[in-house]
Each structure stands twice: as structure tokens, then as C-alpha cells.
Image: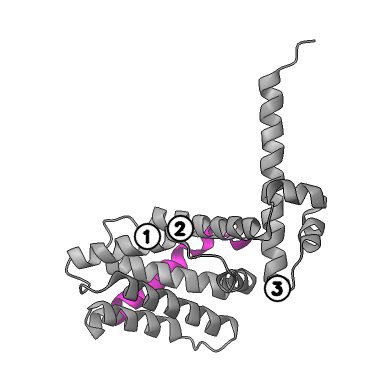
């Protein structure tokens, strides 16, 4: 009987990918429920139904796991938004829609929101893909005359810091119904838009974010 070595190797790689994915899904659920500090390798392997040795085969350290979890969450959300927000859409609308989409996802799935919050509070570094995407949108806005020229690091810190505070307010039940629209509008004013345009774009972007929200499944992220 002839053995198809290529098929066997492909099947093995597929099993590895499935096991890794199961570990990441388990980590998202566990961290969301217990928080990072209260979570352990035992929790992850129990939730994924794998051995401790299997866990370390894929993630030698907890930091390796956390980086993979954050990359999974970030890449999935950005892929959906990129598909719905082509460069032909003004930078102000793209940026506002991304913010509203993140807030809507946190509102619809608090467990996902807590995972992101807790990962942000760990020793992990910043998220290059998200920052690079934001920088491109801001540069587009400056080139189009929508945004004022400003220090990129200051603008990025202002936006990401504000986003995390709004996320916290949502998770703690402190955000009023119009809170998110007002915050995004204020950011747009800071970037250079008039208050009237900022309020209109924030409202329109919130509606657009709600329309695409059903295509983002947090725990499949």
C-alpha cells in the first residue's frame, strides 16, 4: 500500500492549526471571564481540552500566548473594517467608523471587551498594525484638508487613550446612549473639523458601524 506522505503531512499541519486555534479560543474565553492575572496555564489547557505539554509546544511562554490572542482579535476586526472602509471614503468617516465599530463590539460582547482591556493592561507592547492603520488614515485626512497637521505620537496617544477610556465606561455601565457619538465628535473637532461636521460624521459613522457589526463575531476572532 502506497503512503501519500504529502497528504499525511498536510493532515498533520491541519491538526496543529486546529489545536492552536482551540487554545486561542480557550484563552479568549478564560481571560474574559477571569482576567489575565487570575488565569493560569491549567485554566487554558482545561478549557481547550489539551495537555500542559501541548500548550507549551505552541506557546512556550504566557507572553507568546497573549501576543497571539491580541493579534487574532486585532487582525479579525481590522479585516472586516478594511473590507467596508475603502480609501475612497473620507478619512474622517473611516476613522470615526473604526472607533464606533470598536465601541459597538464592546457593547455587544462585554467579555471580548474585557479581554482587550486586560491585554492592554499587561506588559505587552503596543499594537503596530492598529497604529500604522490609524497613522495612514490621519495622514490621508491631512492631505485632504480634513485634519490639521499635528504631532503623530500626540494624536495617536490622544485617540487610543480616549478609546480605552470609553471602552472602560461602556464595560462599567457608565456610558450614556449618546456618549460614544459625543466623544468621537470631540476627537474630530480636535483633529480640525468644525463642530457641525464632526457631529454629523460621528452620527453617520455610528450608523455605518451598526450596519457592519453583525459581520464581526468576537469569539470567532
Q: CA distance from mark 1 to mark 3?
A: 30 Å
Asked which secondary structure carries label 2, the reply is helix
Of callouts 2 and 1, which one flags the residue occurring earlier in the amino acid sequence? 2
- Neighbour class for label 3 at 10 Å: few (<14), some, many (≥20)? few
- Whole-percent x, y for residue 3 in the image: 75, 15
Residue 192 percent across, percent down from the top left: 22, 78
Q: Is residue 106 magenta?
A: no
Q: Earlier in the sequence, mark 1 or mark 3?
A: 3
Boundaries of the magenta span: 199-221
Which residue is painted at 70% across and 31% down in the image? Answer: 11
Which of discs 2 and 1 lies nearer the camera? The answer is 1
Q: Quadrant of residue 144?
A: bottom left
Which residue is painted at 34% across and 71% down in the image?
153
Query: Quadrant of the image for the N terminus?
Result: top right
Quickly name the residue at label 3.
37
Determine crowd level at label 1: few under 14, some 14-19, many 20+ residues with C-alpha closer than 10 A.
Answer: few
Residue 50 showing in the rendered view: no
Which label lies toward us, 1 or 3?
3
Camera sees residue 194: yes
Q: Nearer the viewer, mark 2 or mark 3?
A: 3
Say which residue appears at 39% left-offset and 83% top-offset. Answer: 183
- On the rendered image, what quadrant is the C terminus found in? bottom right
CB under 8 Å between callouts 2 and 1? yes
Cβ–Cβ below 8 Å for labels 1 and 3? no
**Which residue: 68% across, 23% down?**
7
Disc 2: which residue: 78
> Would you name the residue on which mark 1 appears?
133
Instruction: Name above or below for residue 27 compared with residue 37.
Output: above
- In the image shown, does 63 or 73 lie closer to the viewer? 63
Q: For mark 1, give the secondary structure.
A: helix
Amino acid at each position: 500500500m502506497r503512503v501519500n506522505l504529502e497528504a499525511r503531512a498536510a493532515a498533520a499541519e491541519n491538526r496543529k492549526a486546529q489545536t492552536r486555534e482551540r487554545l486561542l479560543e480557550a484563552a479568549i474565553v478564560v481571560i474574559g471571564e477571569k482576567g489575565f492575572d487570575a488565569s493560569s496555564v491549567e485554566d487554558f489547557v482545561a478549557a481547550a481540552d489539551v495537555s500542559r505539554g501541548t500548550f507549551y509546544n505552541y506557546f512556550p511562554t504566557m507572553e507568546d500566548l497573549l501576543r497571539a490572542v491580541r493579534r487574532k482579535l486585532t487582525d479579525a476586526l481590522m479585516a472586516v473594517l478594511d473590507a467596508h472602509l475603502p480609501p475612497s471614503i473620507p478619512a474622517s468617516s473611516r476613522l470615526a467608523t473604526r472607533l464606533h465599530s470598536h465601541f459597538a463590539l464592546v457593547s455587544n460582547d462585554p467579555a471580548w471587551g474585557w479581554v482587550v482591556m486586560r491585554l492592554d493592561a499587561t506588559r505587552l507592547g503596543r499594537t503596530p498594525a492598529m497604529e500604522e492603520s490609524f497613522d495612514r488614515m490621519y495622514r490621508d485626512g491631512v492631505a485632504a484638508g480634513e485634519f490639521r497637521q499635528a504631532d503623530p505620537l500626540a494624536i495617536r496617544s490622544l485617540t487610543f487613550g480616549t478609546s480605552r477610556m470609553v471602552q472602560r465606561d461602556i464595560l462599567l455601565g457608565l456610558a450614556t446612549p449618546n456618549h460614544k457619538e459625543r466623544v468621537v465628535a470631540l476627537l474630530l473637532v480636535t483633529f480640525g473639523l468644525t463642530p457641525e461636521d464632526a457631529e454629523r460624521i460621528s452620527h453617520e459613522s455610528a450608523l455605518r458601524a451598526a450596519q457592519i457589526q453583525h459581520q464581526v463575531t468576537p469569539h470567532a476572532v
